[in-house]
Amino acid sequence: MTPTEFFRDLNKNTMSIVEDFYAPDATLVDPLGEIQGAKRIRAYYAYQYNNVLEISWDMEPEIVSGDQRVLFWKMNLRTKNLNGGEPFSVPGSSRFRLDPQGKVLFHQDYFDVGAFVYERVPVLKNVIFYLKSKLKKGLENAEG
């Protein structure tokens, strides 16, 4: 199963595919933390997908080099708890290293956790946008 196929097929009703995709001692790293082992990765996905109402992915073709895979994506998401239940999208990328059987040994996701979570919570959203506007103003002043 390729990373593209895995994410296309993963949902709260298909968590059994996690252990088909990851090696038993796999590591998953994302901006929210690091998880060791396929069983713990499955529990992490199950928790994350628990509040998902809709999810889809826009994915570019995978970049393949030996046992490495890189995938650029945009996650389109609607959840109960973020963005007032309205859909939103977050771009990102993932890097994978496979074992000789083709299972994932190492998976690291790269995405803006602020755009994913913090900017979708009303109280935090206002603070984040205020800080971004101050930083932008400072940059504009520095550029003169």
Image (spheres, grey):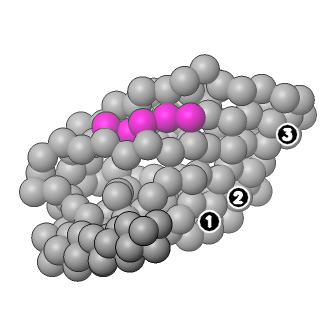
Disc 1 versus disc 3: distance between alpha carbons?
Answer: 18 Å
Q: Which residue is mark 1?
A: 35
Give the magenta part as a residue range.
72-76
Q: Dot 1, how many residues are within 10 Å of its Cα: few (below 14), some (14-19), or many (20+)?
A: some
> Which amino acid is tagged 3?
Asp
Question: Is label 1 in contact with label 2 (beta carbons under 8 Å)?
Answer: yes
Nearer to us in this view, 129 or 115: 129
> Which amino acid is tagged 1?
Ile
Report the side of 112 relative to 109 (left or right).
Answer: left
Nearer to us in this view, 7 or 41: 7
74 is within the stretch colored magenta: yes
Q: Can you see residue 60?
A: yes
Instruction: Give the quarter of the image for residue 2.
Output: top right
- The residue most toward the top is 61
SS at mark 3 in the image? loop
> Which amino acid is tagged 2?
Thr
Q: Which residue is mark 3?
A: 99
Q: Which residue is mark 2?
A: 27
Q: Dot 2, how many residues are within 10 Å of its Cα: few (below 14), some (14-19), or many (20+)?
A: many
N-terminal-most mark, 3 or 2: 2
